[in-house]
Image (cartoon, rainbow, N blue to C red):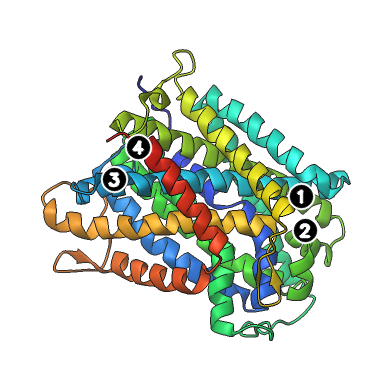
Amino acid sequence: MGELKRELGLGYATLFGVGLILGAGIYVLVGRAAGLVGDAVWLSVAFAGLIALSTAFSYAELSSMFPTAASTHTYIEKAFPNLRVLAFVSAWLIFFGGVAGAATAALGFASYFVSVAGLGSNAIVPVTITLLALLSLLNWWGIKESASLSAVFTLIEASGLLFVAALGFLFPQRQPDYLSFNPNVDPVLAVMVGAAIFYFAYTGFEYQPTLSEETKNPERVVPKAIVLAILVTTLIYILVAMAVVRLIGWEDLAHSKAPLAEAASRVWKPSYALLSFIALFATTNTVLGFLVSASRLAYGLAEEGVVHRGLGKVDKWRRTPYVSVAFAGVLSILLVLLTDYLPKVTGWRLAFGQYQYELIDLVGKTASLSVLLAFLLVNLSVVVLRRTEAERQRFFRIPLSIRNIPVLPLVADALIVVFVALSFSDWIVWLSTGLVALIGLLLYKR
């Protein structure tokens, strides 16, 4: 075991969070969600954002109380001390969400890369694995180096998204009806399932507290960084979702491997290459952020003594948790291999009505379900700790409380329950999540 190096301030912490949230979702999954929902895809984006924002407030308050890399595990354990195994499973699901998030974002990178490079679809998995391996090496090299690169990539990807939004509102190629839905699906259910597919685009803020032990003054800095990151990305996402359907029809978006680049090219042809190039930075940034965060969470769990203490080993030269770094990287690669290999062998094909899932949808929904289940307990933890540890200092408090009971976490949990019940009906996603939880229990040290 060893101590990590405190390097990050509010700027880096916020940009790191924005970089985590932006990326593969908006650049890759917006087309898939639009193909299901129609011109009203912005409603799916907004609904997913509402859940994300409510839960982000919970993480902000809890991280101001317990600035630790174990984050989710610590929060739930403090609220429910007699349910330590539940705290561990929740943290393990968040860890898996990071691993699956890295895999999903890497697949998004590979999708754009093969399009730009003119390679065949058979190259997607090899390119994905290569990216995961290279970024795992950077993750080991150092948090300051990782955060600096992430900050640069975040600014590049944000500029690309704002460029698409500007094109859509200034040079529209069609006039969408923002309340018009795909006629082949039920509108309410379409919004829910579209949000389930797109929700991956919002994941990331829950990993910001895992950097608490590498952040200066984390009790104050991390909560601010979480709130700032989710507000910035929500605004950008809604703008892009409303702009993109002004450039290209939702039917074409559904079948595009590079939806934002293709939409922008309808106004300015060279923008296809420009946006595809920026998407490479965006998805790379997301992969790096998830690998860093998942490895720090694994390190935190080792510090708490609930997994093998070897995961808590710190490289004496780089002062990074090198075992956890390798663990997160290898698992993300295995996930890509399994999700690519199993459907080919078994012939499984998943669909919602006439809508056919692809590999990236399945991995993204598995990541989303994992974190949503953990969010239920995190939101409850805020409510419980307001009672059981009312005197503990909080450098951030969730707004809108009734008799010291925060309302937003309860609203978020109600939305999550409805969201999961309506949107996650794929048995293979539940099976995958259950198997991941079981693997975690096998590693759990009582």
How far apart marks 2 and 1 lie (CA) works out to 7 Å
Residue 339 at what x, y percent from top left?
A: 65, 49
Q: Which of marks 2 and 3 is nearer the N terminus?
A: 3
For disc 1, the neighbor class at 10 Å (few under 14, some 14 to 19, many from 20) is many
How far apart marks 1 and 4 lie (CA) works out to 38 Å
| Residue 333, quarter of the rendered image | top right
Residue at point 44% right, 19% down?
319
Callout in the foreground (1, 3): 3
Q: What element carries label 4?
A: loop
Q: In which quarter of the image is the N terminus?
A: top left
Residue at point 67% right, 50% down?
342
Residue identifier under label 2: 257
Residue 392 at what x, y percent from top left?
A: 14, 47
- Disc 1 residue type? Tyr
CB-based contact (under 8 Å), mark 2 and mark 3: no
How far apart marks 3 and 4 lie (CA) works out to 8 Å
Tell me the number on the disc at residue 112: 1
Q: Which of marks 1 and 4 is nearer the N terminus?
A: 1
Q: Earlier in the sequence, mark 1 or mark 3?
A: 3
